[in-house]
Image: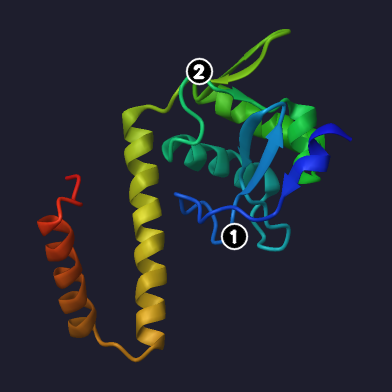
Amino acid sequence: MGCLDNLVDSFPEPKNAASEEVARDIACKGELQLLPPIDLKNGVPIYVQLKEGLKSLIVAGFYSEGSQLPTVRQMAIELKINSNTVARSYTELEREGIISTQQGRGTFVCGLPNQVKSDIREQQLDAMLDRLLSDAFALGYGVTDILDRMRKKIAIKDMNGGMNK
């Protein structure tokens, strides 16, 4: 069974907004490999979820430039999806210049163009803000309350040197 023996279902909150589900981590051959979450019921094609999830993991720094991705077969087994689906995602990512497949060596991350990184980061921030606002409104907070609290939190972070930009 190999890597399947080491499947761990819990992982700290992912650093991306690819999905609200937690990404799974696979300990295999002493290396940590993160797999994007796949939701079979959300109506988005699986190959699109995989492609976008891998982009998000790259933007979040889980896969850096030069990192090797799992093989098509390994990814399909771990995610319990068809290998043709993984191959389609990899082909599209390769067409976009994000990954490169080297015969006999594997598939490697080339990186993301800065504009793509920027677009994905904006999408992730928007998703986080949408969740924050939905939760805050559900708790009965108004716009003014939320903005006041955010200003206070930002001021505290700024005073403590926690703001990186």
The percent coordinates of residue 22 (x first, y second) are 59, 56
Q: Residue at x 20, y 68 (%)?
A: 153
Of residues 55 and 45, which is closer to you in this image?
Answer: 55
Quadrant of the frame with the N terminus: top right
The percent coordinates of residue 92 (x first, y second) are 60, 29
The numbered mark at residue 51 is none
Q: Quadrant of residue 73?
A: top right
Numbered label tally: 2
The percent coordinates of residue 5 (x first, y second) are 83, 41
SS type, badge 2: loop
Q: Label 2 is placed on what type of residue? A: Gly
Is disc 1 surrounded by few (<14), some (14 to 19) or many (20+) residues within 10 Å? few
The numbered mark at residue 66 is 2
Q: Which residue is mark 1?
A: 21
Is disc 2 surrounded by few (<14), some (14 to 19) or many (20+) residues within 10 Å? few
Q: Residue at x 46, y 50 (%)?
A: 16
Q: Is residue 1 left or right of residue 24?
A: right
Position above or below: 137 against 11 = below
Quadrant of the frame with the C terminus: top left
Q: CA distance from mark 2 to mark 1?
A: 27 Å
Q: Quadrant of residue 146?
A: bottom left
Q: Residue at x 35, y 75 (%)?
A: 133
Q: Label 1 is placed on what type of residue? A: Glu
Q: Is residue 56 left or right of residue 8?
A: left
